[in-house]
Amino acid sequence: MLHMLQSAEEGGNSLFVDGFHVAEQLRKENPEVFRILTTQSMEYIEEGYDVHEINGKEFRFDYDMCARHKVIRLNDEGKVNKIQYGNAMRSWFYDCEPTKVQDIYRAMKTFTEHCYQPRNILKFRLEDGDTVLWANQRLLHTRDAFKNAPGKSRTLTGCYFDWDIVKSRVRFLRDKLSLEQNQPSA
């Protein structure tokens, strides 16, 4: 979730891409790229810290995240069910023979190029006070360039929700309110 506190004077538009849609385009238009991105694991690493203000005091939260997974994940029926791609956190490690590394780079470049095609982008500006929430396992997000007004900086805050917790709360509230069609487990 992102909450815009202070928008930029110019630019800084949010760009969203449906990763499932891009994956299906690749399956149809470039099956070899699709195969690589559904079979080759890649490592992602991000170390650092965030500073959060709680009750007027600043707290530092250190993190050291590491994951290894495929960019496009398929379920047992071969349908796309998860996209995980953060190029800025991508490590140098690949689970493959060294001779295959260039194929992986080309596949990621093709994936990225598809993501930036105008036909695949939903572009809009977040104004002060706007909030956007999305499923991070399907939608990819970035922004375009921006220019700040003198003495003002583009400021937004963000957080992540654990979908298991969100779905649990939705089911609980639906039961409590006697609403139909409780959210399934998947």
Image: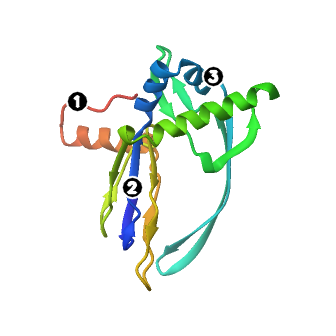
The label shown at residue 181 is 1
Q: Residues within 10 Å of mark 2 (few under 14, many from 20)?
A: some
Residue farthest to the bottom, as pictured: 151
Residue at point 37%, 66% (across, down): 4
| Disc 1 residue type (three-letter) | Gln
Q: In this rendering, does residue 41 appear at all?
A: no
Give the side of residue 100 with respect to residue 138, left or right. Answer: right
The label shown at residue 39 is 3
Residue farthest to the top, as pictured: 77
Rendered image quadrant of residue 120: top left
Per the model, the C-alpha gap separating discs 1 and 3 is 36 Å
Rendered image quadrant of residue 103: top right
| Residue 128, placed above or below residue 111 | below
| Disc 2 residue type (three-letter) | Ser
Q: Mark 1 or mark 3: name the one nearer the start of the chain.
A: 3
Q: Mark 2 or mark 1: name the one nearer the start of the chain.
A: 2
Q: Are marks 2 and 1 in contact (CB under 8 Å)?
A: no
Q: Residues within 10 Å of mark 3 (few under 14, many from 20)?
A: some
Give the side of residue 130 with respect to residue 177, left or right. Answer: right
Residue at point 37%, 74% (across, down): 9
Near-viewer residue (28 or 17): 28
Mark 2, residue position:
14
Q: Are marks 1 and 3 in contact (CB under 8 Å)?
A: no
Per the model, the C-alpha gap separating discs 2 and 3 is 30 Å
Q: Mark 2 or mark 3: name the one nearer the start of the chain.
A: 2
Rendered image quadrant of residue 39: top right
Residue at point 39%, 55% (across, down): 14
